[in-house]
Amino acid sequence: MIERRLSLRLLAYWERARAGRLMPQMADIQPELLEDVWADCFILQINDPQALTFSILHRGENLHDDWPQMAHLNGSISTLFSKRGPVLEDGQIFDADGSVVKYRQCLLPLGDGAQVVAVFGGARFKVFD
């Protein structure tokens, strides 16, 4: 049976990709193995771990235009850095129009040894007017 919840599916993929290491490397992520969910995935290159700045290397077409700001990623990335492990979250926020947006997201570290250099993950949102 194929896991349908994005977070659990990505977590299982990440566990296989790390192959006993602390975390997988960016080169271990193979989009062709995630074709059916790649539109919900992202990869963030960490530019400055102290300032929590990043560049978006991949943002799936299903993610909102104002993502990642609306997903409050800086706090989540900070947690990921301190754990050096997965961060799975769900919650709700308000978009610019005042609509409730419920979300689930999964952030998974990619690294070089013990150093986190990127974040791989996925998110799904639902807007309630």
Image (spheres, grey):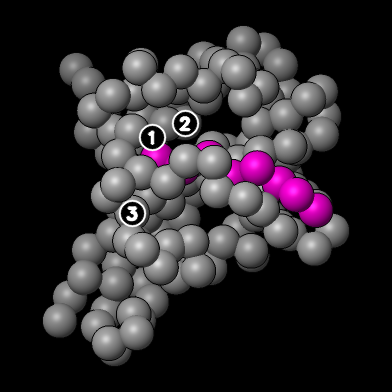
In magenta, the rendered stretch is: 40-48
**Callout 1: 10 Å neighbours few (<14), some, many (20+)?**
few
Q: Residue furthest left?
A: 129
The answer to whether residue 122 shows anywhere in this view is no
Residue under numbered circle 1 = 8
Q: Is residue 127 left or right of residue 16?
A: left
Q: CA distance from mark 2 to mark 1?
A: 5 Å
Helix, strand or loop at label 3? It is loop
Badge count? 3
Residue under numbered circle 2 = 11
Residue under numbered circle 3 = 63
Q: Position of residue 84 (x, y in %)?
A: 73, 39
Contact check, label 2 and label 1, Cβ < 8 Å = yes
Instruction: Find out whether residue 42 is within the magenta segment.
Output: yes
Q: Position of residue 109 (x, y in %)?
A: 64, 36
Q: CA distance from mark 3 to mark 2?
A: 19 Å
Residue type at numbered disc 3? Leu
For residue 51, what is the image quadrant? bottom right
Q: CA distance from mark 3 to mark 1?
A: 18 Å
Considering the image in quadrants, where does the C terminus appear?
Answer: bottom left
Instruction: Find out whether residue 121 is within the magenta segment.
Output: no
Residue type at numbered disc 2? Leu
